[in-house]
Amino acid sequence: QVQLVESGGGLVQAGGSLRLSCAASGRTFSSYGMAWFRQAPGKEREFVAAISRNGGSTYYTDSVKGRFTISRDNAKNTVYLSMNSLKPEDTAVYYCAASRDVLRIYGTGSGYDYWGQGTQVTVSS
């Protein structure tokens, strides 16, 4: 059982940076692969980034490669998404998700077991 709470969203100018955090309440955080998804207004939720249980493997959607970095600190039960060189196209609600099985690195998030409430990221032009 895991509860996830995202934070760190806000308004930023294009080219700026933000770091999102996802805090987990469960005591078995290290047993879960973690991912970030996002959903823009009127659009389907899409995969952004994922990280394996021990942080040894990371995955990114093409549109954020080289700009976003996913990381985790299992001692703090927290996963992060560092976002640099932000673009208006990055504007969305960002969701943290946990998987107790295989990581799905595509699609809208099916197969993930736990979800946070989301945090809004708005990038102005």
Image: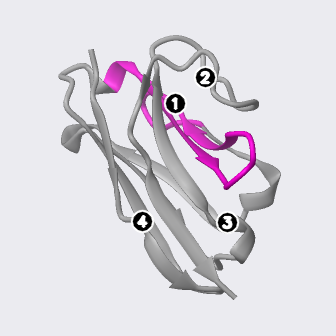
Task: In the rendered view, tell whether residue 111 sits above or below residue 11.
Answer: above
Of label 1 and label 2, which has the lower sequence position?
A: 1
Q: Which residue is mark 1?
A: 52
First in sequence: mark 4 vs mark 3: 4
- Closest to the camera, between mark 3 and mark 1, is 3
Q: Regarding mark 1 in the picture, which secondary structure is present there? A: loop
Q: Which residues are magenta?
A: 30-57
Of labels 2 and 3, earlier in sequence is 3
Look at the picture and state if 76 lies above or below 107: below
Whether residue 18 sits left or right of residue 5 in the image: it is right
Amino acid type assigned to the residue bearing label 2 in the image: Leu
- Looking at the rendered structure, the secondary structure element under dot 3 is helix
Q: Which residue is mark 4?
A: 9
From the viewer's perspective, is 80 left or right of 93? left
Find residue 90 and name its label: 3
Estimate the x, y position of residue 112 in percent, counting from the top left: 53, 20
- Say which mark, if any, is on residue 103: 2
What's the residue type where badge 3 is placed?
Asp
Of helix, strand and loop, which one carries label 2?
Answer: loop
